[in-house]
Amino acid sequence: MLDLLPDLYDLYSDRLRLLNLNWKHFGDKPIFWGPVQTVSCFEDNSKVAELLASPGDGQVLLVDGAASHNRALLGDNLAQKGIDNGWAGVVINGCMRDAGTINQMPIGVKALGTCPIKTDKRGQGEVGIAVEIAGIEIHPGEYLYADLNGIAVSDQALAIPNLE
């Protein structure tokens, strides 16, 4: 399977909401999906680190970083924690760093861009709340589907064509 979203939209256009931003893809997993866990944080990835250090059970971590390009909310060490703990992928409404290394890792990552500067660790952020990205409200427990064509969310799990 090389593309997911076109097939999903052909089957479920009435159930999907497109997060229509100029996402950049990172990681060696171009297609990923799963139930959403949310975190809202601004230039502080303390909560991102806490979540990726916990069992992911196939979830996708959706990080609302308020589209900031001033600090990276994910780097290679946190991506490795996500892999080790079973997270399906990470989506960042903001920036990440260590792109060269993460591109070789078996995880899917979408972000608005890169920034080489790490965040301050102040322990700030909110976990498990509704976030709004690209005018779309996303709740924990909804399902996120990502591939090289973009990102979409649904309030329920959808059967994946050519897989199930």
Image (cartoon, helix red, strand yellow):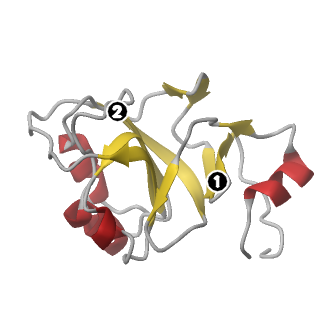
The dot on residue 65 is 2
Against 57, residue 90 (above or below) is above
Residue 18 coordinates in the image, percent (x, y)? 69, 38
Give the number of callouts.
Answer: 2
Look at label 1 and name its amino acid: Tyr
Q: Point out the tag, 1 or 2, that comes first from the N-terminus.
A: 2
Depicted 70 relative to depicted 23: above or below:
above
Name the kind of residue labelled 2 in the image. Gly
Residue 65 visible (yes or no): yes
Furthest residue to the right? Answer: 11
- Which residue was labeled with disc 1? 145
Label 2's element? loop
Q: Residue, x 9% and y 33% (percent of image)? A: 122
Image location (x, y in percent) of residue 58: 50, 64
User: Label 1's element?
Assistant: strand
Write down the quadrant of residue 34 in the picture: bottom right
User: With 160 as the anchor, is 10 left or right in this view?
Assistant: right
**Residue at image coords 76%, 40%:** 16
For residue 21, above or below residue 10: above
* Image marks 1 and 2: residues in contact by CB distance under 8 Å: no
Question: Which mark identifies residue 117?
Answer: none
If the image is split into quadrants, where does the N terminus sit? bottom right
Residue 158 point in image, percent of width and height = 77, 55
